Amino acid sequence: MYDEIKDFPVKAQAEALTRALVSVKSVNGTDGEVSMADKLESIIRSFPYFKQHPEQVWTQVLKEDALGRKNVFALLKSTFENKQTIIYHGHMDTVGIDDFGSLEEHALDPDFLQRYFADYAKDRDVQDDAATGDWLFGRGALDMKSGDAVHLCNLLYYSEHREQLHGNILVMFNPVEENDHEGVMKAVDELIRLKKEQNLDYLLAINGDFVSPLYKGDARRYVYTGSAGKLLGCFYIRGRETHVGETLAGIDPTLIASKINSALNNNMDCAEKIADEVILPPSCLYLRDQKAFYNVQTAGTTHLYFNYFLYERTPKAVLAQLKDTAQKACDDLELFFREQYTVFSRNCGLEGQSPDWAIEVMTYEAFVDSLKLKGVPVEEITDQVVEDHPHEDFRKISYKIIEALEAHAGDNRPKVIVFFAPPYCPHNYLREEVQVERRCDQILDQVLREAELETGETFAKKRFFPYLADSSYLAMSETAEETASILGNFPGWGKTYSVPLEQIRKLNIPVLDMGVYGKRAHTWMERVYKPYSFGVLPQLIRSMTQKVLDEFA
């Protein structure tokens, strides 16, 4: 690849590399992620510096990964003896291409898509963009193969101008970002190993993940000084089945779920209150009753879970909000059922004791504790469920663990169990009280001011990257006490899923997102804006890199 781009200016290099990466289908959860890792490794190894130093490019295979996916690393050492190091990182997987519909075979063909959208009168915005020739289309073009390409360009540049670096550059590309972030979590151990064996001091990690306009007509280029975290807030809802001919005698779990969903879903009252930041409310990702087929019996159980972003709020506070919301929904429904039954019985002329509509709400940890007091072998049952479902989706196996425990205890009373399921993304941001982080923030302000004068671009700095990113696993703001208080509410934690919390705290690398700019990520209209992403961003990252390394040399 080097021979093809060596004489290109950086803008053309970045576009050529983006096209080369987009051409590799690397959908999350497929062996295309392995092909993408191979492609990235081969590109890096084609650079003259790494031909001379092949040992400074390597891969890390993810243990127990059925597909054999791997992280890709390259370490570029300064001509100066210096341990100060900046990390460039990005992810190599994409979402699927089903959304392209009849154009699926062209999902990785930027030129075809540009011609197609130039004639696409159904969406004026995408048609206008395509007509300019300034936008590159295709799955992964924005999220985030163009960002990877920018990192490769800067790696190539510094490999040929090492004298400009008062420190080292470590480049890292990770798979499995689009769902469970296993790539970067496995990379944490490798980063700790390198830190020790190579005597590296990680000053800053720069992610090139995409940024987008926040509203129509928004021309600002955003830079983020931290990562939003995430929890998956889950509800296991056990009702009381009944024949539809006796519907008021039962407790319908879909009705409980709908009440909880109505209370939480996209409700800004449930979001954090942080001025001048993009703060998002909870959003429902799954709501389904567990009836296997049609009959005239009401549902027995319903599964429901929400995406919950973390900014400054603690995981413990999220758990409390979930439990309080479920409790209010159940209390309101008990009153509702009582009122409806009064009307029903009066109309029918029925007498006698009314049904019991009480619904207990508890956390998973409280549920488990109650079972242990009754002698239920919780750990053995959990281990058996995990063993019986080795390839099950993390979310589904969490519910299966609860179902198995409930069945063993013979506990069919109506209840709502509140818990967490993967993924868990810690949150982080540059802190004023930490000297290195405060100085990086100040240097960023200087870099952005200079770039505005040189390029005419308008930059805006925000604290929290508004999308989920691998940067969450390089530092965390949650204390050990805060995380310890919620781990008991992850069914199967440490058996099916875990996060290397202590290792992340050991690393504690300040993170920035200085991303490529584009529109409509995760849609078939995904596109990256070439003039900024390939023309301005590479130099912006270089300026930040050199100023930080110079500061701490």
Image (spheres, rainbow, N blue to C red):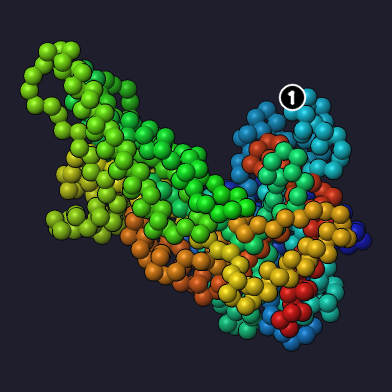
At horizontal 20% and vertical 17% (from top left) the residue drawn is: 344
At horizontal 29% and vertical 35% (from top left) the residue drawn is: 332
- Image location (x, y in percent) of residue 519: 72, 42
At horizontal 46% and vertical 45% (from top left) the residue drawn is: 270
Say left or right for 160 vs 250: right
Say left or right for 246 vs 509: left
Helix, strand or loop at disc 1?
A: loop
Q: Is residue 108 above or below residue 500?
A: above
- Image location (x, y in percent) of residue 167: 74, 79
Say left or right for 284 vs 22: left
- Image location (x, y in percent) of residue 417: 29, 46
Say left or right for 225 vs 352: right
Q: Is residue 318 above or below residue 539?
A: above
Q: Which residue is mark 1?
A: 122
- Image location (x, y in percent) of residue 127: 80, 31
Quadrant containing the N terminus is: bottom right
**Is residue 134 among the parts visible in the rendering?**
yes
Q: Is residue 181 above or below residue 168?
A: above
**Is residue 470 among the parts visible in the rendering?**
no
Q: Amino acid at mark 1?
A: Lys
